Amino acid sequence: MKTDAHILIVDDDQDILVASKLLLKRQFSQVTICNRPEQIPKLFSENDFDVILLDMNFGPGESSGEQGFYWLDKILNIKPDSIIVMITAHGGVDVAVEAMKLGATDFIAKPWQNEKVIATLSTAVQLKKSRTEAENLKVANQTLVQVTNQLNQVQAQEIISQSATMTNVQSLIARAAPTDANVLILGENGTGKELAANALHNQSKRCNNIFMSVDLGAIAESLFESELFGHKKGAFTGAHHDRVGKLQAANGGTLFLDELGNLPLHLQAKLLTVLEQRQVTPLGANKAVPFDVRVIAATNMKKTELTNESKFRQDLLFRLNTVEINLPPLRERSEDILPIAQHYLTLYCKKYGKASKGISKDAKNAILHDSWPGNIRALRHAIERAVILTEHDELTLSDFQLSSPEQSKKPNINNLPTKPDVNNQLSTISDDVSVSPVNEGELNLEAIEKHAISTALKKHRYNISHSAKELGLTRAALYRRMEKHGL
Ligand SMILES: Nc1ncnc2c1ncn2[C@@H]1O[C@H](COP(=O)(O)OP(=O)(O)OP(=O)(O)O)[C@@H](O)[C@H]1O
């Protein structure tokens, strides 16, 4: 079968042109011949050649190769990625080497053997195809990065804030973003760590490259290396294809390591090594690949736990926390509560086609005094749920499932001791939480599900990964159910 390729042969010797056309037509789908190089620009304007076979000398007695160099340069000016194989006179190796320095791909010496010509041109056609594929992949990759970043920007709207602490945080983000410094973001679940990481990326010089988010809490320990470092086909049972790891895939961009605190100590050591060396060896490979990423990490671990070396490697901490950003829980920045609620009210009224005159006074009061253990994520869900369910233009207290201001004044679950006895903790919690417990004998599945989720969330102090694990759910599935139950 013929190879699908268009070959151009440029030579002033008509016999060579005819003989090579006959030979190459059997091998390649299209062959064009040209005996006057002056026609090259016109031919290029009308055709797309895969490989050009170009003579070094035109005219009788010519052997300097000057004309060959001239037309080689001309073609590369017209189409810089052209694959050009030079035809040299017998013994003209020096000239051929010079031509290759100037951009020719290969050369064939006259008089040639047919097999040698076909082999050289087949290799050149293959090279052209690989280059085209690589170029197409590059373009496709750029498009994907643009689409992903646009999606991120749509989802990650601005950081709404009016509190002094958040003004400081925004200023810290603005100062840290343009540098390539690693940033560690600390804060309870739902305080906006990913939003802050997105803002850092969008204000950085890497903003046109990818923002790759990796949820370390969601990766099974056994898959950690394969996910982050990649693997070669056959590296382990089930590795049917080569796979590029997230570190390599984020090359040139920002790598957001979410739920860092969930990483076991032995994997922390592996992560530290690749971040220090700035190169990664995919599983089953014997060569390290360099990568260039800016690392932003986030965790809901308390600083006291992070600095406890039995839980977290201090050398990894020092590598990641060049700049540290602390996102305060919502209950400690009450000035932000109503602006955020108003922001999401406008957003969801638009989304669900509802008219809204705002939030009633008593609902505002309850929103302001709720302890929001799930922070802004929970506030956002509460507003969305209220917008969906309300039968009035104004959101009223009955549209929310909030604890009364009196209940909210009770100690917050996030302030419980870090290592309480689980059973005692649960009994303490059931006194504190605003979630109605399931009545004995009640078999309503929805109520039982809500109760189980609430209990798990309280038990794990709103650590989504740990709660999801205990409930046998993925993080995404837990978030969906929290949304459904307005938790
Ligand atoms: N200041 C803010 N203004 C508006 N929306 C916010 C703000 N902070 C957070 N959000 C919204 O709250 C939700 C949770 O934010 P995000 O995912 O960034 O929190 P997180 O701290 O990374 O949570 P987790 O620890 O559970 O991964 C998102 O929908 C986000 O858009």
Image: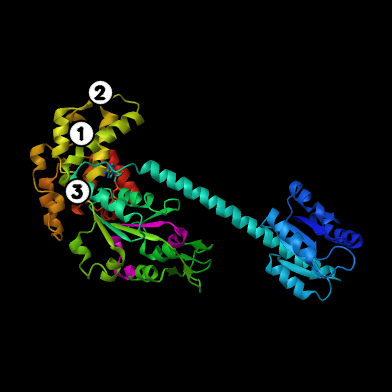
The residue labelled by disc 3 is: 165
Q: Is residue 28 above or below residue 158?
A: below
Task: State the SS at label 2.
Answer: loop
Magenta residues, start to end: 245-268
Task: State the SS at label 1.
Answer: loop
Can residue 448 be seen here? The reply is no
Q: CA distance from mark 2 to mark 3?
A: 33 Å
Observer-nearest of 326 and 423: 326
* Mark sitting earlier along the chain (1/2): 2
- Residue 331 within the magenta-colored segment of the rendering: no
* Residue under the image location 17 percent in, 30 percent down: 397
Foreground mark, 1 or 2, reads 2
Give the percent coordinates (x, y) of residue 210.
44, 53
Foreground mark, 2 or 3, reads 3
User: Which scheme is used to colour this image of the protein?
Assistant: rainbow
* Mark sitting earlier along the chain (2/3): 3
* Mark sitting earlier along the chain (1/3): 3
The residue labelled by disc 2 is: 393
The residue labelled by disc 1 is: 400
Q: Amino acid at mark 1?
A: Phe
Would residue 10 appear left or right of 178 to someone viewing this image?
right
